[in-house]
């Protein structure tokens, strides 16, 4: 109920929270504010999700400028979940920053504004019906998150931020080009006016989209938003940005920013399939997805920094999700399931690595040994998240990858299947080797990092529990939600 | 328009060409504040060289004696296909612009062979530089001519230049402007003018063309000086034919307009030489490629 | 009649080649400013609705931002780094020009592919826009100095602006919002980033940003 108002409320809350952070005097005020705001956002998102799964199938607001169907509401829930978990973790992480990375009031205010601003921008992307506004939101996320990477300016973080800024700005410019081409493709039919870029209008069965222009539009959009989504070969900013940012920011990046960009690409897929038929978009998505998986697998083998390792895992999983979207409705279901699983799992992994990094003073994997003995809670979290990440049963990532394999068999994509299995095998072995070195063994002497706050245990329990539960049981309502989300992407004949 | 042009045109060119050199030198002198040599000085220089005896080095062969002769012969042959604005050339056939470029290349080749024949390192250095810059300048010239051919729709020089009227300019202003700049730059390069080469330098390490002809003397040197003048005339005709779109139909009027244009061009070259310094040799390829680019741009925008 | 569109096209192409071949940053910024003013005039010429307020605002805004404001900001940024005033390219100038010619051929081909679907757009302007986009991309990749990368980004934005003006008619505020927002905030953010980088690294040479590898 009150779904339309929830939409406006969600956006307004994030924006006002961001502005509120400007005036807060102490760091822990900021941290409490972001936790509070993100939890409320999560509740509002669940409300919207429930409304969407009702009779209509969608919710609109502001005269169709905001349009939320099953696909977007699922993503909104995942977004707010990731933000809630990451905000809670941030309150623990930043309380214990040491040395030259002190979380001063000024940095805290900057963090709060950028953090909630980024959440608002991502919500704008997910909720808007107008493809142009969607692009504006993505642009805003690029600019806001750039400064989150270099929250503590140092040589390495500035380098990461500059690469991120340049590469993603090029990507966003290309995506804008694609949006313009999409707008032009409907105008060739004589359609114009204020709602020319509404997705609902472009995706409806009556729209005549010019095939040539839509083809170019999709290529530009795929390359452009694909840059932000971390698809190879345009993923080169990803390892640097994820590894140099503070752990909560990395979690947010991997947990949701990449998925937002993939969401934008997927919004264009029904349009181009409508104009050009099934195979064009699927073929391109398969190529990029497979390439991402292979490249990531190659780099994972010889990583030395834990956060860089997780960043390459993100590239791999984005590739898997893209592959899923390309393999028909069953693949789409698997991809959506994988989105949730990967987001939760990756955030947990970044939390563990971040906190352990604080304890051991470095993120290099050879310095982190015996985590299970040094810090019981985060060592267990590390163990669980890594096992889940490489696809060990009974965690949920195993289920979603298994469903992906079924979809691949169903679509007779044999080469893709073989490559995927080979890459997954390589990743399994390498990541397991890294993890065993980190988790087991004797702990080196350390006494840094302080005590965990109250929220540490709930965070780990919620995340790990979700991974475990979804691995063995999928509630029927959740199943319906995912199916209707996948149905949004289906081709209209 | 006379369809097969008369042979009067090349004859006029043969007579008037050294005058262009004289105008250039006079302009440079006047700008520098001197009185300068008389306008007819190049004629006296050529005559003086022809009267002297030639000295041939012991290491040279028949190639050395052949060089200046072939060079001059090629240029005179080039004059036969070269129209003078609206006035047609004596010989005109489709594809004669390629023949023009080929004849210029032949002349250059003969000069370079003669230079290499001496076995001296200075001439070798000059020959290397000359070939390097010409390798870049020839495509530029071909592109410029190709663009003109594309615009006017013909592959023979005479019809091309005859259809460059004021109307044609109004239609294809950017294209013609770009080609004109290219031809000016190529003219500066091929005639070894500043900013590519200094024709008055005495330092062997900075010469390009001068150093190639260092060993020629007597009548050979006279032939080379005359050939230089003819080359300037040919490139000048290419450029002025484009820049002066006077095609009234009357031979006298067109011819006079062209002559005025040639004089002005010589003055402009003199001014450029006075105002600029020579580029460093490493920048010259960039300069020439920029000229080629202008033509390429003109060609591509005309392609569509 | 005077071919205004073709002249803008030809001069625009030349500004791109000038950017590819110029070796001093100050000169590049001036070429960029000239390019911004030149292409800012495109809305005035292409629009078939006549000179409405919207068209005037669009052209005026673009000329003010891309022709005056951004170059001014870039010159200020360059003044901070008073050591290296030279563009240091990864790709030499002659090779850059030759690549520029290849890019021109590519953009003509692409324009020919797209033209049948975009009936109202002038061919030469379509060609200019695609050429600008690819030249901007090339500049960003092939130059070592952070300021030159920002200049390349602005050239990219110019191309997108021209493309938007000639293809999208009737969609309120899309093109304007998109490009001006993008460029404006982008330049600001990049400017702040360059400030931090210069302070931390002591130079704007992005070739030194190579510690993160693998």
Image (cartoon, grey):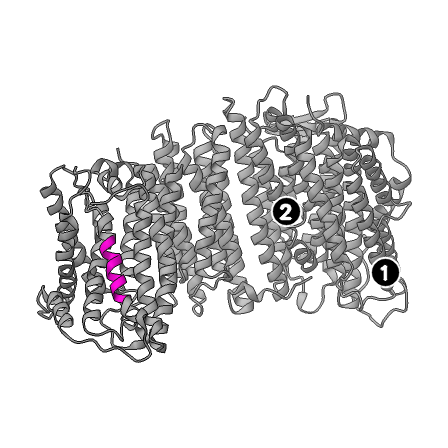
Q: Nearer the viewer, residue A100 or A179?
A: A179
Q: Residues within 10 Å of mark 1 (few under 14, many from 20)?
A: few
Give me the chain letter of mark 2: A
Q: Is residue C158 left or right of residue B14?
A: right
Q: Residue at x 50, y 48 (%)?
A: C185
Q: Is residue A292 above or below residue B60?
A: above
Q: Residue at x 69, y 37 (%)?
A: A283
Q: Nearer the viewer, mark 2 or mark 1?
A: 1
Q: Is residue C13 above or below residue A213?
A: below
As for residue B277 lying within the magenta part, the answer is no
Residue at (48% x, 39% y) in the render: C109
Tell whether A12 sits left or right of A421. left
Where residue A274 sits in the image (x, y, percent)?
Answer: 64, 26
Chain to which mark 1 belongs = A
To which residue does mark 2 refer? A228
Q: Earlier in the sequence, mark 2 or mark 1?
A: 2
Give, as a single range, the part of the protein colored magenta: B67-77
**Disc 1, SS:** helix
Disc 1: which residue: A433
Judged from the image, the secondary structure of the residue bearing numbered disc 2 is: helix
Splitting the image into 4 quarters, where does residue B234 fall? bottom left
Residue B267: x percent and y percent? Answer: 16, 58
């Amino acid at each position: 109920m009150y779904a339309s108002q929830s939409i406006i409320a969600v956006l307004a809350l994030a924006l006002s929270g961001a502005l509120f952070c400007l005036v807060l005097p102490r760091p822990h005020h900021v941290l409490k504010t972001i936790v509070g705001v993100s939890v409320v956002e999560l509740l509002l998102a669940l409300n919207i999700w429930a409304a969407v799964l009702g009779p209509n199938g969608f919710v609109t607001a502001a005269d169709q400028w905001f349009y939320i169907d099953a696909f977007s509401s699922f993503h909104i829930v995942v977004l707010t979940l990731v933000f809630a978990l990451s905000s809670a973790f941030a309150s623990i992480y930043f309380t214990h920053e040491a040395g030259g990375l002190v979380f001063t009031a000024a940095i805290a205010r900057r963090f709060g504004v950028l953090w909630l601003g980024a959440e608002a921008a991502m919500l704008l992307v997910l909720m808007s019906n107008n493809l142009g506004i969607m692009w504006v939101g993505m642009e805003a996320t690029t600019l806001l998150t750039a400064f989150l990477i270099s929250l503590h300016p140092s040589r390495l973080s500035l380098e990461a931020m500059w690469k991120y800024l340049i590469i993603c700005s090029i990507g966003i410019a290309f995506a804008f080009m694609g949006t313009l081409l999409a707008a032009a493709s409907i105008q060739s039919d004589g359609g114009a006016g204020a709602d020319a870029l509404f997705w609902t209008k472009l995706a409806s069965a009556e729209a005549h989209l010019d095939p040539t222009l839509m083809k170019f539009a999709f290529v530009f959009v795929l390359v452009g938003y694909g840059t932000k989504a971390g698809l190879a070969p345009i993923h080169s900013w990803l390892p640097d940005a994820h590894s140099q940012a503070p752990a909560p920011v990395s979690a947010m990046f991997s947990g949701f920013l990449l998925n937002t960009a993939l969401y934008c690409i997927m919004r264009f897929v029904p349009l181009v399939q409508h104009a050009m038929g099934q195979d064009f978009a699927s073929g391109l998505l398969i190529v990029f997805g497979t390439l991402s998986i292979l490249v990531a697998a190659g780099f994972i083998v010889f990583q030395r920094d834990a956060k860089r390792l997780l960043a390459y895992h993100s590239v791999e999983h984005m590739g898997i999700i893209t592959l899923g979207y390309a393999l028909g409705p069953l693949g789409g279901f698997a991809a959506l399931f994988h989105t949730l699983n990967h987001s939760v799992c990756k955030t947990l992994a970044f939390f563990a690595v971040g906190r352990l990094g604080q304890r051991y003073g470095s993120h290099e994997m050879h310095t982190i040994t015996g985590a299970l003995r040094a810090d019981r809670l985060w060592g267990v979290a590390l163990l669980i998240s890594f096992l889940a990440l490489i696809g060990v049963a009974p965690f949920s990532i195993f289920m979603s990858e298994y469903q992906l394999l079924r979809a691949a068999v169903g679509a007779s994509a044999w080469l893709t299947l073989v490559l995927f299995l080979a890459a997954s095998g390589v990743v399994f072995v390498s990541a397991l080797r890294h993890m065993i070195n980190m988790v087991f063994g004797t702990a080196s002497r350390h006494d840094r990092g302080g005590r965990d706050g109250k929220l540490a245990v709930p965070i780990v329990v919620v995340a790990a529990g979700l991974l475990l539960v979804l691995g063995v049981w999928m509630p029927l309502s959740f199943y319906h939600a995912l199916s209707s989300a996948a149905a949004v992407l289906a081709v209209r004949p | 328009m006379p369809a097969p042009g008369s042979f009067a045109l090349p004859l006029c060119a043969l007579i008037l060409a050294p005058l262009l050199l004289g105008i250039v030198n006079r302009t440079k002198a006047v700008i520098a504040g001197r009185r300068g040599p008389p306008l007819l000085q190049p004629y006296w220089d050529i005559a003086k060289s022809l009267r002297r005896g030639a000295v041939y080095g012991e290491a040279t062969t028949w190639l050395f004696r052949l060089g200046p002769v072939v060079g001059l012969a090629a240029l005179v042959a080039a004059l036969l296909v070269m129209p003078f604005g609206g006035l047609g050339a004596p010989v005109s056939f489709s594809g004669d612009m390629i023949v023009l470029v080929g004849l210029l290349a032949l002349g250059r080749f003969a000069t370079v062979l003669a230079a290499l024949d001496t076995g001296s390192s200075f001439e070798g250095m000059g020959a290397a530089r000359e070939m390097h810059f010409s390798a870049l300048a020839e495509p530029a010239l071909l592109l410029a001519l190709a663009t003109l051919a594309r615009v006017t729709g013909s592959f023979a020089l005479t019809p091309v230049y005859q259809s460059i009227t004021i109307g044609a300019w109004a239609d294809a202003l950017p294209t013609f402007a770009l080609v004109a700049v290219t031809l000016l730059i190529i003219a500066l390069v091929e005639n070894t003018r500043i900013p590519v080469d200094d024709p008055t330098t005495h330092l062997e390490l900075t010469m390009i063309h001068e150093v190639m002809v260092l060993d020629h003397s007597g009548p050979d040197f006279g032939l080379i000086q005359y050939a230089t003048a003819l080359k300037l005339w040919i490139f000048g005709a290419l450029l002025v034919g484009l820049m002066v779109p006077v095609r009234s139909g009357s031979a006298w009027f067109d011819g006079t307009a062209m002559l005025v244009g040639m004089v002005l061009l010589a003055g402009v070259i003199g001014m450029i030489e006075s105002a600029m310094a020579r580029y460093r040799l490493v920048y010259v390829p960039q300069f020439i490629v920029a000229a080629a680019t202008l033509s390429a741009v003109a060609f591509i925008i005309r392609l569509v | 009649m005077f071919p205004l569109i073709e002249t803008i096209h030809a001069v625009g192409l030349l500004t791109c080649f000038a950017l590819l071949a110029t070796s001093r940053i100050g000169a590049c910024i001036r070429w960029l400013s000239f390019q911004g003013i030149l292409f800012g005039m495109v809305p005035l010429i292409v629009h078939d609705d006549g000179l409405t307020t919207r068209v005037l605002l669009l052209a005026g805004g673009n000329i003010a931002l891309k022709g005056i404001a951004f170059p001014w900001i870039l010159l200020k940024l360059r003044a901070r780094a008073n050591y290296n005033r030279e563009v240091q390219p990864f790709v030499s100038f002659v090779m850059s020009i030759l690549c520029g010619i290849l890019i021109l051929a590519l953009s003509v081909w692409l324009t020919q592919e797209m033209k049948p679907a975009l009936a109202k757009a002038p061919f030469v302007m379509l060609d200019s826009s695609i050429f600008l986009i690819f030249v901007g991309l090339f500049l960003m990749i092939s130059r070592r100095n952070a300021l030159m990368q920002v200049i390349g980004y602005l050239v990219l934005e110019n191309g997108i602006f021209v493309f938007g003006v000639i293809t999208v008619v009737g969609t309120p505020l899309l093109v304007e919002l998109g490009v001006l927002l993008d460029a404006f905030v982008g330049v600001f953010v990049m400017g702040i980033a360059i400030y931090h980088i210069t302070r931390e690294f002591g130079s704007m040479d992005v070739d030194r940003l190579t510690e993160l590898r693998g």
